[in-house]
Image: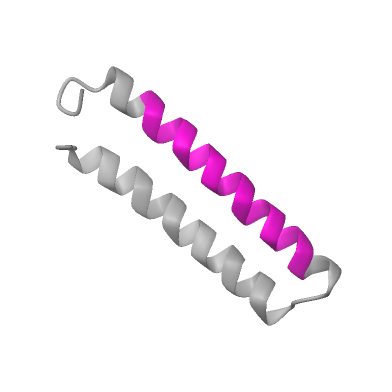
Amino acid sequence: MKTCRTFSRIKAGYETEMGQMSNHSVRHAGTRTGKSSAGFAAGAKQRMARALTQHYAHCPECG
């Protein structure tokens, strides 16, 4: 699958966000903030999938 720079930039931004939240949840495992960070990371993964799908559907270079 050939993708454009915008696709890569969107993906990298979400992966950075998910990584930071996942690391925070590991550091604070068992606490309220750790649990919420894990949930936010899962939500970010869903938002990334939605954003990339929408981009792929509308981008003339990717689609």
Residue 10: give x, y in percent of width and height: 36, 44
Image: 39 above or below 31: above
Residue 61: give x, y in percent of width and height: 14, 26
Q: Is residue 12 left or right of residue 5?
A: right
Q: Quadrant of the C terminus?
A: top left
Image: 51 above or below 42: above
Displayed quadrant of residue 35:
bottom right
Q: Nearer the viewer, residue 7 or 26?
A: 26
Direction front: furthest residue: 1
The residue at the point 66 percent across, 53 percent down is: 40
Direction right: furthest residue: 32
Q: Is residue 17 left or right of residue 43?
A: left
Displayed quadrant of residue 43:
top right
Image: 48 above or below 57: below
Q: Quadrant of the N terminus?
A: top left
Direction bottom: furthest residue: 27
The residue at the point 59 percent across, 67 percent down is: 22
Q: Is residue 9 left or right of residue 1?
A: right
Residue 55: give x, y in percent of width and height: 34, 27
What is the count of numbered marks? 0
Colour scheme employed for the rendering of this structure: one colour
Query: Which region is colored magenta?
Result: 34-54
Residue 53 inside the magenta-drawn segment: yes
Q: Is residue 37 left or right of residue 58?
A: right
Magenta stretch: helix, strand or loop mostly = helix
Residue 4: give x, y in percent of width and height: 18, 37
The residue at the point 17 percent across, 20 percent down is: 60
